[in-house]
Amino acid sequence: MGATSLKVEKTQGEITSLNRGESGFSLIEVTIALIILLVSLLGITLTFTYAMGYNTGNNARSQALAVLQQEVETMRSKKFAPTNTDTDLAGGVKAARVVAPVTGGRFRVDITIDDDVATGGTQINAATTFKEITVVVSTESPTPGWQFAIPIRAVLRRVRAN
């Protein structure tokens, strides 16, 4: 009988050691793992949020550049000849206007025409043969981020044609 009881004790010992080796995760281990997972997910979420804001700003900037290019091309197409000069090329500060491209957004366009670049400020002289046209495009209602950098300026210089 002694042998049988010894075998039972050994079996119980094996079971006890198996239970110790196969124990599950403790509550602290699970909590630490969840904290690590949440911190990594938070980092990924912030990265996506930053990327979306950056892309939105770049989209607005590219739209502003398209509006600027259109305005500069319009000013270049105006006649500036000795016999005929478009009234749109008269010197001075033009009234600001809002442009809404079909791609979305609203942009403010400011145009200044200086007839005498050598003198400070904006000069008006109908007899001049040289004009400096400044076109500034900015968002009508900027939001924080990239869009504050949008005010884009182009300077166009025209010489009276023969």
Image: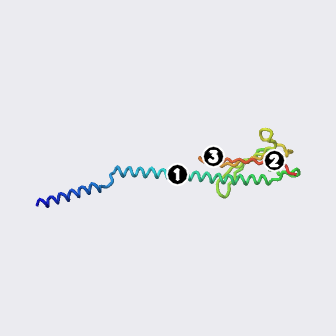
Q: Is residue 101 above or below residue 110?
A: below
Question: Which is nearer the N-term, disc 2 or disc 3?
Answer: 2
Residue at disc 3, secondary structure: helix
Residue 47, numbered circle:
1
Horizontal side of residue 80 vs 136, given as left or right: right
Classify the position of the N terminus by image quarter: bottom left
Horizontal side of residue 22 vs 98, given as left or right: left
Question: Which is nearer the N-term, disc 2 or disc 1?
Answer: 1
> Which residue was labeled with disc 2?
90
> Which residue was labeled with disc 3?
148
Residue drawn at x 41%, y 50% is 35
Specify the quadrant of the image occupied by residue 128.
top right
Q: Amino acid at mark 1?
A: Thr
Residue at disc 1, secondary structure: helix
Q: Amino acid at mark 3?
A: Phe
Q: Nearer the viewer, mark 2 or mark 1?
A: 1
Residue at disc 2, secondary structure: loop
Single out the residue that lies furthest toward the front: 3
Q: Name the spot of residue 17 as percent of width and height, x first.
A: 25, 55
Q: Name the spot of residue 43 as percent of width and height, x first.
A: 48, 50
101 and 57: which is toward the camera: 57
